[in-house]
Image: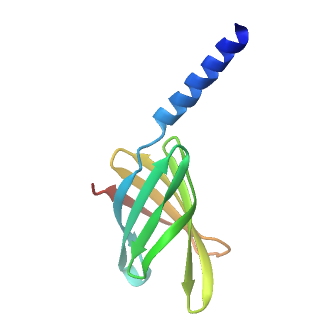
Amino acid sequence: MKQLLTLLVVGLLVCAGAALAADVTGVWKASMPGRDGGTMEMTFTLKASGETLTGTMGGRMGETEISEGKVAGDTVSFKVKREFNGNQMVIKYTGTVAGDEIKFKSEVEGSERPPREFVAKKSN
């Protein structure tokens, strides 16, 4: 009986955690600060399944699959691998979901560049 009660409580906690996870599935659009005061328009197409996040990021350089995507409560994180002039770079994105916005921070791994912050808004 005690074991059954423990399993029931654990099951309820798991379900509650899944219910509290942010709803990030959908299309998100953002304008990210670029070089020389310009902006870069980006589209994130995301799909959450439990704590796993998959999808793509699109912009002026085309569409790229995200990797290592995670959802934990109202926090999302993933990486994007890009190639510029024969050099590969990994950009890590972390964000906090609040309603129909995700406040993102992006950082190039292994770079001394400061992180960039921007907001993506849900478009569907």
Front residue of 76 and 117: 76
* Residue in view at x 70 percent, y 7 percent: 1
* Residue in view at x 37 percent, y 76 percent: 40
Front residue of 43 and 116: 43
Q: Where on the picture, by quarter, is residue 67?
A: bottom right
Q: Where on the picture, by quarter, is residue 31?
A: bottom left
**How many numbered marks are there?**
0
Residue 116 in the image: above or below residue 54: below
Residue 27 placed where, x, y %? 34, 59
| Outermost residue, left side | 124
Residue 42 placed where, x, y %? 37, 70
Residue 2 in the image: above or below residue 96: above
Residue 63 in the image: above or below residue 121: below
Residue 5 placed where, x, y %? 65, 12
**In the picture, which quadrant includes the C terminus?**
bottom left
Q: Is residue 30 left or right of residue 86?
A: left
* Residue in view at x 44 percent, y 42 percent: 22
